Image (tube, helix red, strand yellow):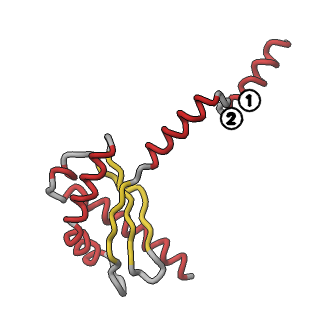
Amino acid sequence: MANHNLGRLTEDVKREISAALPEIKDPRVSGEIVSVSRVEITSDLSYCKIYVSVLGDEEKTDSAVKALERSAGFIVRRINARIKMRKMPRLIFLPDNSQEYYERITGIIDKLGIPGGEDSKDAEDGADTADSE
């Protein structure tokens, strides 16, 4: 039961932070396309990790994270006004580099020459049956 409530709380916090982003006046946030990709709250509500991604390079993401750390008070007030919680967790903003990681892994796989997976195998099988008809 507690995990269900924690999951719902996590989604609510993510939604509120995402809604607060356009109201932040710092140009490192307002001038970029910033999104909250993932939120993790500890079970004792002590910490809340917020993974942020920015369209662009890693420098933009790092500067947006710093700007959000400076705006943490505003975000905490916004969350407190909309979500009733026993305890407000400490917000920790982290850069989400999963897209860059994905691109790096894809590049490694391309260099190795491994086929695309099941989809490409199905396409090859379809091509073999079409040739035999």
Q: In the rendered image of this protein, does residue 3 appear above or below residue 13? A: below
Q: Are marks 2 and 1 in contact (CB under 8 Å)?
A: yes
Quadrant location of the N terminus?
bottom right
Residue 21 drawn at (x, y percent): 25, 58
Say whether residue 131 is left or right of residue 117: right
Relative to the observer, which residue lies in front, 23 or 114? 114
Q: Which residue is mark 2?
A: 117
Relative to the observer, which residue lies in front, 76 or 70? 70
The kind of residue tagged 1 is Lys
Q: Which residue is mark 1?
A: 121
Residue 89 drawn at (x, y percent): 35, 78
> Which residue lies at the image location 26% right of the left edge and 73% below the top edge?
76
Residue 112, located in which quarter of the rendered image? top right
The kind of residue tagged 2 is Gly
Q: Which mark is residue 34?
A: none
The local crowd at label 2, few if under 14, some if 14 to 19, many if 20 or more residues have their Cα within 10 Å, is few
Residue 28 drawn at (x, y percent): 19, 51
> Which residue lies at the image location 39% right of the left edge and 81% below the top edge?
46
